[in-house]
């Protein structure tokens, strides 16, 4: 029994030694793994904290880049690494002034540094200059970049934009087509291609690209406006009108869209709609001067056609105060200011034929004081003049008188007077009176010197029309109570 016990103890001690000798290395590996994981998690947490926390942490990273770069540049103004770090920062922030300064320096020092990325330096220099509107500098940088890499999207796109700005639309299209080959659905590329074709009056191609650009970027109101222009220039005015009407409320495109919409409606004789278009356009703020003047001018002409002279004069005088020599504004003001003060003169010149004849009748009936006048015949020659034949009986004489009222402004020549004289003779009238809203030529006046025809020009006509209503009222029989 004792022997068995000794054997058992020896076996137990043996197995314990084996277990302990194997366990210690395993435990060491586990501890090392746990320690490694802990260190990795700590580093990742700190890194995540710098990237994910608020603006303070990010700002500190930006400030650190600038501070470190400035320290290096204080020791060496041509430190490639420091300048590159600053250039990357400013370019990504779209701080174009600072970026352009940095890449200008990098261009100067690049030949002395084998590690300088000459392509990227020229590309970013060109883009920064383009953003600043410096076309010569932009062309220089982008051209050098393209000589290094002709298949780069940014190079071809920005050179295409530059050529577009310089009005080199054919070159712009070539470059933009190369950019499109690298990024077929880029809305900016499609947009510039469409606008370039539009400038070349290739409306079919322009509409194709602009429609694609709008599908991708529907908020591009300028492209939508250009699409409407394409329709308009291609005589597809209904489609153009829909887009222009849609764009009327837009703060930027609205005034021009209203001008186009109003013009289309005016040409289609939709006067009320055209007036509404122009009035909506004038409600916008910060309208371009040329658009403002044209909106007011076309609105004024519509008001004149509708005989709303007072409204028309308001806009004509506004135009005159902005540009005293704009179109025929001064002539229109001179003509219609007098008409606005004399309602009968408006009727004489602008009213329908029936209203014009009714006014002429009143003039005839009140032309002679203390006379009995009876109208026996009225004839109208289109919308040019009206002839009225009347028997007149005064205390001193009685006779048949023929009146001719000429509506056409300007100078009346001898031919019209000869025709009138012939009509007077045919009617066996003893006297003729020819009235015009304009004046008579010297030949016309000489023709009537030996004939019983009196001539009445604009000034005297205006006075007659001012008083005709008063005289007509006095001649009218009083109503019995």
Image (tube, rainbow, N blue to C red):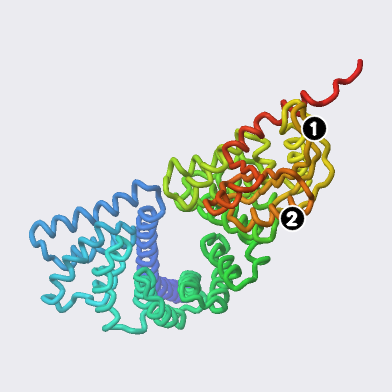
Say left or right for 470 vs 137: right
Q: Which residue is mark 2?
A: 381
Q: Where 440 sits versus 128, above or below? A: above
The residue drawn where x is 71% and y is 33% is 367
The residue drawn where x is 62% and y is 55% is 262
Mark 2 vs mark 1, foreground winner is 1
Picture quarter containing residue 454?
top right
Q: Nearer the viewer, residue 304 or 354?
A: 354
Q: Which residue is mark 1?
A: 393
Residue most extreme to the right:
481
Q: Nearer the viewer, residue 392 or 249?
A: 392
**Image quarter of the C terminus:** top right
Circle 2 SS class: strand
Picture quarter containing residue 160?
bottom left
Q: Earlier in the sequence, mark 2 or mark 1?
A: 2
The residue drawn where x is 31% and y is 68% is 127
Q: Could you tell me residue 94's position as x and y percent? A: 33, 59
- Does residue 198 appear anywhere in the picture? yes
Residue most extreme to the left:
75
Few, some or many residues within 10 Å of mark 2 (<14, 14–19, 20+): few
Circle 1 SS class: strand
Q: Could you tell me residue 470's position as x and y percent? A: 72, 26
Few, some or many residues within 10 Å of mark 1 (<14, 14–19, 20+): some
Contact, mark 2 vs mark 1 (Cβ under 8 Å): no
Q: Could you tell me residue 112's position as x and y percent? A: 11, 76
């Amino acid at each position: 029994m004792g022997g068995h016990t000794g054997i058992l103890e020896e076996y137990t001690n043996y197995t314990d030694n084996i277990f302990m000798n194997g366990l210690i290395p395993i435990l060491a590996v586990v501890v090392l793994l746990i320690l490694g994981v802990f260190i990795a998690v700590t580093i990742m947490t700190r890194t995540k904290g710098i990237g994910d926390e608020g603006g303070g942490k990010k700002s500190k990273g930006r400030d650190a880049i600038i501070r470190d770069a400035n320290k290096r540049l204080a020791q060496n103004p041509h430190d490639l690494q420091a300048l590159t770090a600053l250039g990357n920062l400013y370019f990504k922030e779209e701080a174009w002034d600072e970026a352009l300064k940095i890449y200008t320096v990098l261009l100067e020092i690049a030949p002395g540094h084998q590690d300088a990325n000459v392509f990227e330096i020229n590309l970013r220099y060109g883009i920064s200059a383009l953003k600043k509107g410096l076309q010569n500098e932009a062309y220089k940088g982008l051209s050098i970049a393209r000589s290094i890499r002709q298949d780069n999207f940014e190079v071809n796109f920005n050179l295409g934009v530059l050529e577009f700005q310089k009005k080199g639309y054919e070159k712009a299209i070539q470059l933009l087509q190369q950019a499109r080959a690298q990024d077929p659905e880029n809305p900016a590329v499609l947009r510039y291609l469409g606008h370039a074709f539009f400038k070349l009056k290739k409306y079919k191609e322009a509409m194709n690209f602009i429609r694609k650009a709008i599908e991708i970027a529907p908020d591009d109101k300028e492209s939508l406006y250009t699409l409407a222009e394409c329709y308009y220039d291609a005589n597809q005015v209904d489609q153009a009108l829909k887009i222009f009407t849609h764009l009327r409320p837009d703060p930027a495109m609205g005034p021009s869209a209203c001008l186009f919409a109003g013009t289309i409606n005016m040409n289609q004789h939709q006067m009320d709609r055209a007036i509404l278009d122009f009035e909506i356009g004038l409600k916008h703020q910060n309208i371009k001067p040329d658009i403002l003047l044209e909106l007011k001018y076309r609105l004024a002409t519509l008001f004149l056609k509708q005989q709303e002279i007072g409204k028309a004069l308001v806009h004509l005088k506004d135009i005159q105060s902005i540009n005293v020599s704009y179109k025929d504004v001064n002539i229109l003001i001179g003509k219609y200011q007098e008409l606005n003060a004399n309602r009968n003169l408006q009727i004489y010149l602008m009213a329908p034929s029936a209203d014009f004849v009714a006014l002429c009748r009143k003039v005839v009936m009140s032309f002679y004081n203390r006379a009995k006048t009876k109208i026996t015949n009225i004839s109208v020659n289109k919308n040019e003049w009206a002839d009225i034949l009347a028997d007149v009986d005064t205390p001193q004489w009685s006779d048949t008188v023929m009146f001719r009222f000429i509506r056409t402004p300007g100078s009346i020549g001898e031919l019209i007077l000869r025709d009138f004289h012939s009509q007077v003779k045919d009617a066996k009238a003893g006297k003729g009176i020819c009235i015009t809203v304009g004046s008579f030529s010297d030949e016309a006046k000489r023709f009537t010197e030996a004939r019983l025809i009196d001539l009445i020009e604009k000034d005297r006509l205006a006075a007659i029309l001012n008083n005709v209503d008063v005289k007509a009222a006095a001649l009218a029989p009083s109503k019995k109570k």
